[in-house]
Image (cartoon, coloured by chain):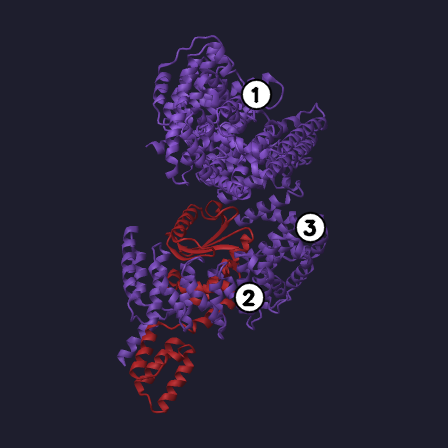
Chain colours: A red, B purple
């Protein structure tokens, strides 16, 4: 079983921390620090595996890999294969790359809820659930349809108050539906040109 | 229009990635990223926490804003700050209708809360509702949360829905439902045991993803109970075949490999199913061969599958063809430049040599390369491998290497592991006593505080007993070489306490034995050592006892003792020590020195630490005293079970207490040992009056009067007696039982028992490790150092050696069997372990593995004859111990023992159990004859030599 996934930068700042067995906050910090210490002391061109039984108990291993400024770390026990974990990590990073188009540290830290969503599609309760990055990206896109940028929400809500239309209701289905709805409203004579322009600008942003 | 453009631009900036956050959050992240110090970061985060606190609790924050605050809260907690004030908001957000808010809420609670948190109860309802939702994404979100948040108590609340979801039309949901059920099984196997068949059913799911998901729980189930899943072997082999033949959809391919992750899981399962099962294994041979042949060894994942194949091949019933291809793969791994592959190669080699030891030889140079590799992980793995292939011919090289490495690292955990491995190997395979002592010295010097204290005890025992041969000169040589090396080492500035204890003991016992060193020289060294380690009371205690031994040997030999001034001052200092143990030792030392030669010789006979002491377990010498008391009108003793009438409950309770004393070590609450025994009655009577108002939980106070029942009655006061009985009835029971194992001696029980167990374990292990390696094809050209090393590691196992190790195996087998038996015997006497242990303790030298290797390597003697002898002896002891167990009046014995152990307030000394007995037995009547008592006590100490480490310190705490 996989015990945890940690993403941190090369200065030891955690960017994503997920333990599949609950660890209290202080313990988490301690583990992150000790893992960072171990990783720092590793030379280049050595294996990607570290034995961490002093931190997690007997037979627990860790696989790490650096991508640009980030350390990706998977911690797992003997029921997983080290090399396979390394590949799973690769698949995870590929998925991140697809979702953020050229992922970098700021994407991970700024959108860590999305990173969590992606990770949850790969690993559930410590077991590997999915190993295909395209499948994961598909699911995540489906979920993100339901996510809207906050500014858009502000506008939508202000619409609600100034025009009395509940745009939020349509927000989930994105572009086309909103547009067709807006055109419909315009044809029905209940909107004005500024309203149409606003909606169109949303659509350009969203699509 | 201008305005619109700016709005549009801002939107574009923040909507990046679709999960956009506000500029505030971006600023927070940036400012934290730019901080130079931890303090600066903390300041920023604390400010952020204040903002969040205010905003989260304000009632008119819009919901979408709340979501962002929650994200910021998660971020803050990830940085290590307390965010518990916001947990309730996270819980509230899970109730929201909108998926995005709900997901954020679930994410926050899964990260914040553990499954036993109070707030979980508020979420269970929402989860139940969401599991029934029409939107499968909501269901998935809820299942994610289920995996993390549901504990044993809440499983029944969501179980029906989860089971229903196993048949959901979306495969993503089915997959997650399988995982959730698996999670339930991990949390509490009992609550889902009736649903386990569902995992089998899901194995036949139309969707390969769901099938793959069901492999995870099945793997766990098979780990626990292989036999109930043997019938699935065919199915697993078929699935694996289909996967390998690319029958799965293309989307499961990864780097041109067909579904490698599924293959790996299946291979793991097969290796469990085929382990030690020839019939099942035969079904797997073809497919395993196919996979190994087809595997692409250029890609990472291909090698992962190959490695898994080797693991499987080495676990199932061996097949020569497969073993051969596995060995080929291993050599490919080891020759590769990639450290990852070398690591796997070493690991795989470690697995394969269990079956075909000869393949280690072809890879000797590669293994040695790995040993010298800068990569620490690889190095450790290689040491693991060497540990597995140690035998008597290469033990010296391997242990030396291990010690060198141990010295070079700082990691305490690993240092401990290596140290204990060195000790284990040295005990098992030591070629000579000299080497053994030197090795132990090195281990102690560099990792003395890390090794198990019983190792020190073993070492002392070994020096005391020799290697069990009847050759006295060899033993005394061993001792004098030990003394010599210790005198050299003792001057070093920083020595671990454990090691110093051994040194002190050996110097005290054998320092003057061979006449090479004068008493004053050794006592001077001892005094210097105590001065250098003045904070360590245990070492001081050992040193004082050593001094006492040396002086009494001197006196016994008729020489005049003139104490060095530093000794004098040391003793004076200890006479006023706050540790009662040290005080007592100092007083005893003073008393012993003033006695005449004959008395001293009785107290401290030369080299008598291995002699047995007879114990009067029935305490018959007290009979007269009891009779006298009864005649005077004392109440007769009523056995415990009769007294309370609730023997079952009290038994249960007493066991309960016993275990708690074991766990918590209440030593500190024992009575301090009064140095003048005649004081006892007065002290007790005063404390007896205290009892009725004392808290029953305060063990020391409570057991005091109970224990004094015997001793006090002579003081005559009938009023006092009456009270005591009252007390005894009310409080006596738990007190009796709770003190049953007097903590100091229970300590020794533990370690004794531990020793036997350890030995039996290591001897069974030796069966595994003792595999000898043939070296027929050993290369002749030995030029480089490396090759030499290789030869010493892998070669040198001649035919005779092979035979020897075989006999060694035999011996160890029987030994382990015998010791197992005795352990079982001990286990059966669960109700009165304390009473029985002393008898069932097997003679240590029989089980001593060091000795065993020696006997087996004595070539002139027929090993089987020896074996016979050993066997008989062991059986004798086993019989003895079992007869001890079956004694019908064991509980009675126990109660007497309990009385005695509590009445003698011997908290400070921790001799072996049988010795305690002698000691205890003596004490009640000791008032009249101090000298006799001292003699006995000294003998006890000489044999036991274990001043308990914790006691003095604990007392110090109390007294301060």
| Residue B611, label in figure | 1
Q: Label 1 marks which chain's residue?
A: B
CB atoms at circles 3 and 2 under 8 Å apart? Answer: no
Q: Which residue sits furthest bottom?
A: A188
- Of the pair B783 and B377, the residue shown nearer to us: B377
Residues at marks 3 and 2, CA–CA distance in whole angstroms = 35 Å
Query: Left or right of B831: which side holds B57?
Result: left
Examine the rendering and report whether any part of residue A137 can be seen: no
* Mark positioned earlier in the residue sequence (2 or 1): 2
Examine the rendering and report whether any part of residue A24 can be seen: yes
Q: Quadrant of the N terminus of chain B?
A: bottom left
Q: Which residue is mark 3?
A: B322
CB atoms at circles 2 and 1 under 8 Å apart? Answer: no
Density class for disc 1 (Cα within 10 Å; few <14, some 14-19, many ≥20) is few
* Mark positioned earlier in the residue sequence (1 or 3): 3
The percent coordinates of residue B629 (x first, y second) are 49, 24
Q: Label 3 marks which chain's residue?
A: B
Question: Residue at the location (40% across, 30% down)?
Answer: B719
Q: Label 2 marks which chain's residue?
A: B
- Of the pair A80 and B401, the residue shown nearer to us: A80
Residues at marks 1 and 3, CA–CA distance in whole angstroms = 57 Å
| Residue B835, label in figure | none
Density class for disc 3 (Cα within 10 Å; few <14, some 14-19, many ≥20) is some
Q: Quadrant of residue B269?
A: bottom right
The answer to whether marks 2 and 1 sit on the same chain is yes
Q: Quadrant of the C terminus of chain B?
A: top left
Query: Left or right of B577: which side holds B658?
Result: right
Question: Residue at the location (46% across, 12% down)?
Answer: B554
Q: Which residue is mark 2?
A: B175
Residue B620's place in the image compared with A5, above or below, is: above
The answer to whether marks 1 and 3 sit on the same chain is yes
Query: Left or right of B644: which side holds B698?
Result: left
């Amino acid at each position: 079983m996989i015990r945890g996934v940690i993403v941190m930068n090369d200065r030891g700042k955690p960017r994503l921390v997920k333990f599949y067995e609950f660890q209290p906050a202080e313990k988490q910090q301690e583990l992150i620090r000790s893992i960072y210490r171990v990783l720092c002391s590793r030379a280049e061109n050595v294996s990607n595996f570290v034995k961490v039984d002093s931190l997690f108990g007997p037979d627990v291993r860790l696989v790490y890999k650096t991508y640009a400024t980030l350390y990706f770390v998977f911690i797992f026990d003997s029921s997983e294969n080290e090399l396979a974990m390394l590949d799973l990590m690769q698949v995870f990073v590929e998925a991140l790359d697809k979702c953020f188009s050229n992922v970098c540290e700021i994407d991970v830290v700024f959108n860590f809820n999305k990173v969590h969503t992606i990770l949850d599609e790969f690993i559930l309760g410590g077991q590997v659930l999915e190993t295909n990055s395209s499948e994961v990206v598909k699911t995540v896109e489906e979920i993100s349809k339901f996510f809207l940028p906050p500014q858009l929400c502000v506008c939508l809500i202000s619409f609600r108050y100034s025009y009395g239309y509940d745009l939020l209701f349509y927000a989930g289905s994105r572009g086309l539906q909103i547009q067709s709805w807006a055109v419909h409203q315009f044809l029905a004579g209940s909107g004005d040109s500024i309203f149409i322009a606003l909606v169109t600008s949303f659509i350009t942003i969203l699509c | 229009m201008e305005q619109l453009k700016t709005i549009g631009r801002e939107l574009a900036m923040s909507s990046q990635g679709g999960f956009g956050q506000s500029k505030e959050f971006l600023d927070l992240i940036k400012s934290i990223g730019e901080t130079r110090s931890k303090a600066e970061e903390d300041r920023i985060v604390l400010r952020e926490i204040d903002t969040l606190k205010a905003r989260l609790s304000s009632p008119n924050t819009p919901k979408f804003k709340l979501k962002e605050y929650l994200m910021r809260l998660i971020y803050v907690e990830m940085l290590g700050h307390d965010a518990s004030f916001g947990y309730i908001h996270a819980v509230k957000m899970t109730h929201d209708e909108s998926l995005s808010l709900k997901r954020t809420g679930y994410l926050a609670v899964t990260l914040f809360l553990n499954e036993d948190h109070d707030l979980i109860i508020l979420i269970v309802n929402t989860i139940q509702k969401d599991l029934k939702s029409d939107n499968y994404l909501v269901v998935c979100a809820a299942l994610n949360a289920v995996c993390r948040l549901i504990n044993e108590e809440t499983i029944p609340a969501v179980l029906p829905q989860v089971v229903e979801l196993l048949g959901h039309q979306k495969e993503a949901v089915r997959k997650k439902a399988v995982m959730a059920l698996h999670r339930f099984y991990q949390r509490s196997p009992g609550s889902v045991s009736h649903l386990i068949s569902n995992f089998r059913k899901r194995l036949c799911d139309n969707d390969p993803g769901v099938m793959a998901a069901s492999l995870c729980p099945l793997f766990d189930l098979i780990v626990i109970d292989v036999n109930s899943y043997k019938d699935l072997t065919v199915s697993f082999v078929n699935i694996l075949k289909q996967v390998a033949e690319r029958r799965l959809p293309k989307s499961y391919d990864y780097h041109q490999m067909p579904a490698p992750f599924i293959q790996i899981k299946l291979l793991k399962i097969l290796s469990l199913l085929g382990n030690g099962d020839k019939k099942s294994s035969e079904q797997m041979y073809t497919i395993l061969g196919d996979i190994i042949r087809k595997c692409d060894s250029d890609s990472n994942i291909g090698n992962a599958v190959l490695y898994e194949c080797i693991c499987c091949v080495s676990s199932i019933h061996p097949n020569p063809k497969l073993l051969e291809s596995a060995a080929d793969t291993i050599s490919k791994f080891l020759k590769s430049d990639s450290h990852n592959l070398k690591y796997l190669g070493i690991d795989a080699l470690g697995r394969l040599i269990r079956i075909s030891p000869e393949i280690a030889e072809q890879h000797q140079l590669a293994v040695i390369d790995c040993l010298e590799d800068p990569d620490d992980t690889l190095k450790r793995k290689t040491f693991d491998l060497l540990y597995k292939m140690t035998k008597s011919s290469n033990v010296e090289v391997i242990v030396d290497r291990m010690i060198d490495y141990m010295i070079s690292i700082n990691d305490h955990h690993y240092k401990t592991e290596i140290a204990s491995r060195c000790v284990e190997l040295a005990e098992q395979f030591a070629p000579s006593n000299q080497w053994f002592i030197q090795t132990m010295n090195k281990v102690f010097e560099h990792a003395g505080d890390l090794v198990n204290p019983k190792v020190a005890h073993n070492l002392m025992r070994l020096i005391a007993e020799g290697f069990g041969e009847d050759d006295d000169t060899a033993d005394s040589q061993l001792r004098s070489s030990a003394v010599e090396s210790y005198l050299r080492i003792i001057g070093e500035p920083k020595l671990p306490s454990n090691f110093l204890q051994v040194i002190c003991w050996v110097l005290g016992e054998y320092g003057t034995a061979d006449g090479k060193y004068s008493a004053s020289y050794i006592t001077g060294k001892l005094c210097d050592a105590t001065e250098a380690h003045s904070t360590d009371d245990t070492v001081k205690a050992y040193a004082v006892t050593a001094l006492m031994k040396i002086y009494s040997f001197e006196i016994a030999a008729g020489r005049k003792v003139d104490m060095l001034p530093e000794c004098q001052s040391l003793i004076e200092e200890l006479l006023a020590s706050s540790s009662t143990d040290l005080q007592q030792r100092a007083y005893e030392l003073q008393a012993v020195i003033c006695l005449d030669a004959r008395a001293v010789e009785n107290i401290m006979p030369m080299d008598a630490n291995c002699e047995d002491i007879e114990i009067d377990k029935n305490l018959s010498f007290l009979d007269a005293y009891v009779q006298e008391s009864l005649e005077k009108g004392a109440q007769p003793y009523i056995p415990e079970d009769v007294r309370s009438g609730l023997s079952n409950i009290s038994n249960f309770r007493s066991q309960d207490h016993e275990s708690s004393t074991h766990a918590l070590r209440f030593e500190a609450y024992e009575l301090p040992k009064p140095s003048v025994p005649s004081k006892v009655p007065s002290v007790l009577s005063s404390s007896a009056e205290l009892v009725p108002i004392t808290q029953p939980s305060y063990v020391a106070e409570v057991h005091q009067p109970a224990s004094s029942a015997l001793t006090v009655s002579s003081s005559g006061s009938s009023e006092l007696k009456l009270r005591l009985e009252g007390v005894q009835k009310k409080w006596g029971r738990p007190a009796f039982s709770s003190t049953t194992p007097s903590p100091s001696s229970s300590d020794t029980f533990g370690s004794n028992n531990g020793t036997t167990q350890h030995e039996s374990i290591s001897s069974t292990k030796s069966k595994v490790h003792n595999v000898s390696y043939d070296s027929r094809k050993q290369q002749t050209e030995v030029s480089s150092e490396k090759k030499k090393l290789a030869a010493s590691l892998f070669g040198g196992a001649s035919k005779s050696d092979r035979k020897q190790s075989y006999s060694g195996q035999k011996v160890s087998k029987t030994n382990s069997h015998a010791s197992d038996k005795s352990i079982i015997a001990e286990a059966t006497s669960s109700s009165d372990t304390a009473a029985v242990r002393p008898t069932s303790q097997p003679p240590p030298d029989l089980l001593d593995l060091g000795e065993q290797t020696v006997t087996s390597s004595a070539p002139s003697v027929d090993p089987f004859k020896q074996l016979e002898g050993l066997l008989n002896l062991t059986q004798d002891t086993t019989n003895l111990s079992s007869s001890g167990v079956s004694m019908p009046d064991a509980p009675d014995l126990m109660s007497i023992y309990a009385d005695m152990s509590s009445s003698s307030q011997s908290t400070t000394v921790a001799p072996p159990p049988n010795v305690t007995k002698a000691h205890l037995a003596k004490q009640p009547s000791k008032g009249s004859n101090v000298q006799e008592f001292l003699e006995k006590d000294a003998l006890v100490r000489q044999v036991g030599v274990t001043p308990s480490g914790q006691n003095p310190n604990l007392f110090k705490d109390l007294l301060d």
